[in-house]
DNA sequence: AGTGACGCCTGGGAGC
DNA sequence: TGCTCCCAGGCGTCAC
């Protein structure tokens, strides 16, 4: 599932593959893929044609490509989205929704998305960040991420720790997989009340989040199936480095206890029963 | 204002 | 074999 590392790998591919190129033609074959573009698919196409894509940027799980018009093309992969840079005569995949051809006649950009939770839109402004993304917090790999502000904000929350890690307005880029991996490394259960964590504990947690995200970027991200791939269609290798996520009943790599699976927020959470004990009422 | 529940969407697999 | 149900889960929206 695309979280920060997977999206970052895609961003790097876009920077290599489409930045600096001028759009010649755009085809939208499924309007749902541009539903966030409120002015409609026709307007989406008009705002892209003839424009040059300047760079490839990312905040959390959002991507955007500033245009020479002052607009920006925003992309979100949702659960199953792919941004591919491939030859125009490559076979058309089943869930291909948007094609962007370039004036240089080289490889085209494709948005493919099985579940269409993701999508594309063109918005006004993209420097330093499109206004519609202003609510998204900086992510832990952002040089301007404010560690102490995060520590204070998390401790002001009155919620569970995993819920806070998944809140993109508090810290962005972390989804279910990397939340579980961060918690495993920090030896904390996701139900721990945020307001009871000490400052040093939150700093350690943040350091683990940074580590696991950076290591996953190095490995090209996590690919459980063919749904997540780079712009070149390559799968990531980080799945083999997962310690908790998806490892129900397998031994904890640290202590050997079988990893447990719990239902949480209508999804699965994986943790070690020994390394990450459930919080007891009134203690932490 | 902060918190949490809900619905969107499709394919694959389990179960009958 | 074929049908139904469940699961994966990011995030915008809405209610409290």
Image: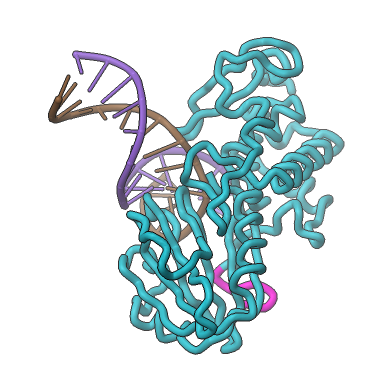
Chain colours: A cyan, B purple, C brown
For the residue pair A13 and A11, the one nearer the viewer reads as A13
Tally of marks = 0
Q: Where is residue A227 in the image (x, y as percent from the top left)?
A: 47, 46
Locate residue A276 relative to residue A100 in the image: left or right. Answer: right
Task: Give the residue furthest to the right.
Answer: A200
Locate residue B3 relative to residue A179 in the image: left or right. Answer: left
Locate residue A168 relative to residue A115 in the image: left or right. Answer: right
The magenta-colored residue range is A126-132
- Residue A131 is covered by the magenta coloring: yes
Q: Position of residue A225 (x, y in %)?
A: 48, 39
Q: Residue at x 36, y 75 (%)?
A: A27
Examine the rendered structure and indicate whether residue A22 appears above or below residue A146: below
Q: Which residue is drawn at 46% across and 72% down?
A: A121
Q: Residue A280, can we see it?
A: no
Viewport quadrant of the C terminus of chain A: top right
Q: Residue A198, can we see it?
A: yes
Locate residue A14 relative to residue C14 in the image: left or right. Answer: right
Give residue A223's quadrant in the image: top right
- Residue A51 is covered by the magenta coloring: no
Give residue A178's quadrant in the image: top right
Q: Where is residue A186 in the image (x, y as percent from the top left)?
A: 76, 30
* Main SS, magenta residues: loop
Task: Give the residue furthest to the top.
Answer: A257
Task: Give the residue furthest to the front.
Answer: A89
Q: Where is residue A195 in the image (x, y as percent from the top left)?
A: 72, 36
Q: Residue at x 60, y 15 (%)?
A: A250
Q: Which residue is drawn at 56% across and 57% down?
A: A232
For the residue pair A274 and A103, the one nearer the viewer reads as A103
């Amino acid at each position: 599932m695309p979280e920060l590392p997977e999206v970052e790998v895609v961003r790097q591919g876009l920077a290599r593959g489409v930045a600096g190129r001028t759009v010649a033609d755009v085809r939208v074959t499924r309007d749902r893929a541009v539903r966030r573009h409120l002015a409609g698919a026709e307007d989406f196409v008009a705002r892209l044609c003839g424009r040059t894509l300047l760079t490839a940027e990312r905040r959390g799980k959002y991507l955007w490509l500033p245009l020479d018009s002052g607009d920006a093309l925003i992309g979100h992969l949702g659960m199953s989205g792919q941004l591919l840079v491939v030859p125009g005569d490559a076979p058309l995949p089943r869930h291909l929704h948007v094609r962007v051809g370039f004036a240089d006649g080289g490889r085209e950009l494709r948005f493919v998305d099985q579940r269409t939770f993701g999508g594309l839109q063109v918005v006004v402004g993209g420097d330093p960040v499109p206004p519609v993304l202003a609510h998204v917090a900086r992510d832990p790999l952002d040089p301007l991420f404010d560690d102490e502000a995060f520590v204070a904000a998390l401790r002001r929350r009155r919620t569970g720790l995993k819920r806070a890690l998944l809140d993109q307005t508090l810290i962005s880029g972390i989804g279910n997989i990397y939340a579980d991996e961060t918690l495993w490394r920090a030896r904390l259960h996701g139900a721990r009340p945020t307001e009871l964590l000490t400052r040093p504990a939150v700093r350690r947690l943040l350091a683990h989040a940074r580590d696991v995200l950076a290591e996953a970027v190095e490995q090209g991200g996590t690919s459980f199936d063919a749904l997540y791939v780079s712009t070149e269609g390559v799968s990531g290798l980080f799945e083999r480095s997962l310690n908790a996520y998806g490892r129900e009943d397998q031994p904890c790599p640290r202590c050997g206890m079988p990893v447990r699976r719990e239902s949480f927020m209508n999804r699965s959470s994986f943790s070690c029963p020994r390394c990450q004990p459930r919080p007891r009422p009134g203690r932490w």
